[in-house]
């Protein structure tokens, strides 16, 4: 990764234009060729320096439900519960964390109403309580990740 | 927050979401390519995406950096117990810090869970994350009634959020 890649990452976390030739517009601003910009983006995606390039959608505004959930699972049951929780297609991410609440996952459902019923199903299947922590407010976070 | 207008998605909008949620085509005319995929014109795709952007359905269009591969290996979920009547003020201040990528107000579950403010902190390693969390503690002063930093020890599942066609 060189300074042009870094400039691309730093300047292109938002504001990609909606027009006929958006890559050309951005490339001109960066002082490189359109083909070079496309090739660099391809390469950074391949090397996993970028996880994605394109529009980032707001899950709730698409009509779906979203919540962060936590569980406290004793070590002997951890693998079993992990399998049971992960088997739900609504579980998008799941992380082990070093805390009494040692399993944290994001639930994404087709409708907001589905969240409660999926939580209940998870509790029934695993035998453990699920702590539901839906966001009550999201604070504005600027685009500022710099490399 | 910018003011956002309401916008309800129709079938074609949903097709555009499905066609672009994993990425925009890396071709000179990406909206033309999306239009061909969903069966409309580039002008239509562009005007629909513009409306979705203005209404906040699209948060932004651009590159999503991978913190981990870019050397920020120590991300920690910092959680804070702050007075409810000051959460807006502190949430905005903490969200504006350059090492915080997300900040949310979430419900407490007492007595096990007393924290109402979550801030994802990024650093090159755990020590750097803890140093940065200390800056948040300093910012909160006496209104920091307790906090912890939870590090992830394992990714158990990661599929991302996807809507169906």
Image: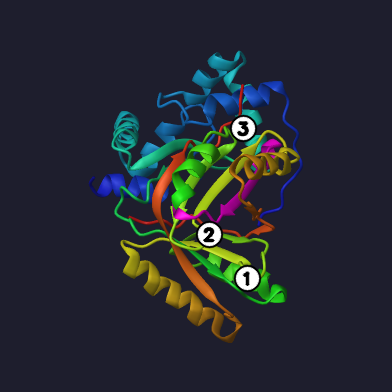
From the top left corner, tell me how far across and down residue A108 is, in percent: 62, 39
Q: Which residue is mark 2?
A: A101
Estimate how packed mark 2 is, as few (under 14), some (14 to 19) or many (20 or more) residues with alpha carbons within 10 Å. Answer: some
Residue range of the region highlighted in magenta in the rendering: A58-75
Membership of A69 in magenta stretch: yes
Instruction: Answer yes or no: are tags 2 and 1 on the same subunit.
Output: no
Query: Which secondary structure, mark 2?
Result: loop
From the top left corner, tell me how far across and down residue A138 is, in percent: 63, 57
Instruction: Answer yes or no: are tags 3 and 2 on the same subunit.
Output: no
Residue B29 visible here: yes
In-front residue for pair B84/A41: B84
Instruction: Answer yes or no: are tags 1 and 3 on the same subunit.
Output: yes
> Which labelled disc corresponds to residue B49?
3
Left or right of A13: which side holds A47? left
| Earlier residue among tags 1 and 3 | 3
Query: Which secondary structure, mark 3?
Result: helix
From the top left corner, tell me how far across and down residue B165 is, in percent: 61, 21
Distance CA(mark 2)–CA(mark 1)? 12 Å
From the top left corner, tell me how far across and down residue A8 is, in percent: 35, 45
Q: Residue at x 55, y 77 (%)?
A: B146
Distance CA(mark 3)–CA(mark 2)? 40 Å
In-front residue for pair B33/A127: A127
Residue B57 visible here: no
Q: Chain of mark 1?
A: B
Which quarter of the rendering shows the N terminus of chain B?
bottom right
Q: Residue at x 55, y 80 (%)?
A: B140
């Amino acid at each position: 990764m060189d300074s042009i890649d870094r400039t691309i990452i730093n300047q292109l976390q938002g504001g990609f234009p909606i027009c006929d030739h958006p890559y050309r517009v951005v490339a001109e601003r960066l002082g490189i060729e359109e083909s070079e910009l496309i090739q660099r983006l391809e390469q950074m995606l391949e090397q996993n320096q970028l996880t994605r390039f394109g529009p980032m959608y707001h899950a709730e505004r698409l009509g779906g439900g979203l919540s962060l959930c936590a569980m406290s699972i004793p070590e002997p049951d951890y693998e079993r519960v992990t399998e049971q929780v992960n088997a739900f297609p609504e579980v998008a991410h799941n992380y082990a964390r070093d805390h009494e609440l040692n399993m944290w996952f994001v639930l994404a459902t087709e409708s907001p109403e589905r969240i409660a019923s999926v939580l209940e199903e998870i509790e029934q299947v695993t035998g453990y309580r699920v702590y539901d922590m839906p966001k009550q407010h999201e604070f504005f976070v600027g685009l500022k990740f710099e490399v | 927050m910018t003011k956002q207008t309401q916008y309800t998605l129709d079938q074609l909008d949903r097709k555009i979401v499905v066609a672009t949620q994993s990425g925009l085509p890396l071709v000179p005319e990406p909206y033309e390519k999306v239009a061909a995929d969903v069966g409309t014109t580039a002008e239509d795709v562009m005007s629909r995406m513009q409306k979705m952007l203005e209404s906040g359905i699209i948060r932004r269009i651009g590159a999503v950096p991978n913190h981990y591969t870019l050397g920020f290996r120590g991300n920690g979920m910092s959680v804070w117990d702050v007075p409810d009547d000051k959460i807006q003020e502190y949430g905005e201040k903490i969200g504006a810090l350059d090492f915080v990528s997300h900040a949310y107000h979430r419900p407490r579950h007492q007595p096990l869970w007393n924290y109402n403010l979550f801030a994802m902190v990024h650093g090159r390693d755990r020590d750097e994350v803890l140093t940065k969390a200390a800056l948040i503690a300093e910012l909160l002063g006496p209104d920091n009634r307790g906090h912890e930093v939870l590090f992830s020890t394992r990714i158990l599942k990661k599929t991302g959020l996807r809507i169906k066609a």
